Image (spheres, helix red, strand yellow):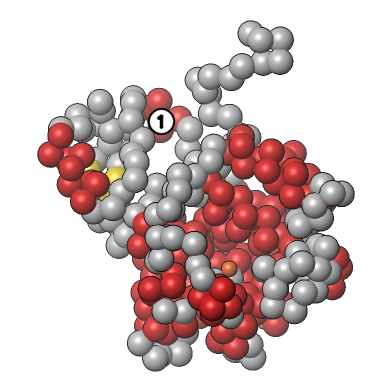
Amino acid sequence: MRLARTVYSADGRVLLQAGIVLKDSYIERLQALGFPAVYVGDPEAAERFRDVVSESTRRHAIAVVKESFEEVKLGSTLKLEPIAQVVNDIVDEIVSTREVVLPLTDIRKHDDYTFGHSVSVCVISALLGVALELDDLTLRELAMGAILHDVGKVKIPEKILLKPAPLSAKEWNEMRKHTLYGFQLLRGRDGLSSRAAHVAYQHHERIDGSGYPRALAGDKIHLFARIVAVADTYDAMTSDRIYRRGVTPFEALQELKELASEGRRQLDKDVVNVFLANVAFFLPSCKAKLDTRE
Ligand SMILES: [Fe+2]
């Protein structure tokens, strides 16, 4: 099989170039490095289906988020400026792109999950913000809140974060605190709007009031947090994790619809509808079975 997309390390170095024929030894090495999958096929065909944000911008953003979060882990203050720069690059690319949006799943190493996830949630939230016709300043504030939504996880012990099994009640309680920790890290920071800081605090609140940490309901949850909740849920569902495989974009779409339905009231219905109306969930050449059985 030929590699259809270049495989990068977490810090943006090329590990295997698109087009290369995969040997057993490469596959073993990729597995040892923790890659759950790669894209195979014709690299030129893959090139036509470009992601809404370029690979280099995405890789750079992941590297910046990783470095910034790891500094906070070591006790430094979170540096917002480099993050604001990559957020601006992401928003600029999204605003200027006129192509069909394809939610290409970023294939990540398991232990880099938080960083890749932060960037994907930023990209998806910004797409939703554009579709919701937010003005430019608001869009950038939303994207900044989105990329930082899980920053509080730097305060959660790794044995909980990376546990390859369901969490105990005690561990789950600790995990939930990442919302408050994130808000505490971001609140009152120069150059960060308070609504962006509230994304960290509120992104696990749910429309019916069943979320955490404050069990806010409906409009009491800020629009930014309602948008990021949809992006977060979508990306978490479609990503491979240590303990399970991700679902396809189409399966995730059905699940989002279900979570926004009257019966469930977990996610904001309007935001989910905007997502469904603006994102292409099928790649060209993808096989589908119609209800006519064709
Ligand atoms: Fe979270």
Q: In percent of the image, x 54 and y 78: which residue is there?
A: 170
Q: Amino acid at mark 1?
A: Ala
Name the quadrant containing residue 277.
Answer: top right
Q: In percent of the image, x 35 and y 62: which residue is there?
A: 111
For residue 275, above or below residue 114: above
Would residue 32 appear left or right of 203 to someone viewing this image? left
Q: Secondary structure at mark 1?
A: helix
Q: Kindly tell me whether residue 137 is visible in this rendering.
A: no
Of 135 and 227, nearer the camera is 227
How many labels were placed on the picture? Answer: 1
Ligand 1 shows up in which quadrant of the image? Answer: bottom right
Residue 77 position in % (x across, y down): 45, 90
Would residue 197 appear left or right of 70 to someone viewing this image? right
Name the quadrant containing residue 91.
Answer: bottom right
Dot 1 surroundings within 10 Å: few (below 14), some, or many (20 or more)? some
Residue 96 position in % (x across, y down): 60, 48
Q: Kindly tell me whether residue 29 is visible in this rendering.
A: yes
Of 129 and 135, nearer the camera is 129
Tell me the quadrant of the picture where the N terminus can be found.
Answer: top left
Residue 293 position in % (x across, y down): 66, 10
Of 29 and 141, nearer the camera is 29
Name the quadrant containing residue 194.
Answer: bottom right
Q: In percent of the image, x 60 and y 66: which residue is there?
A: 146
For residue 37, above or below residue 218: above
What residue is shown with label 1? 46
For residue 123, above or below residue 69: above
Residue 183 position in % (x across, y down): 62, 83
Would residue 123 appear left or right of 205 to someone viewing this image? left
Tell me if the residue at label 1 has its CB under 8 Å from ligand 1: no
Furthest toward the left, the residue is 25
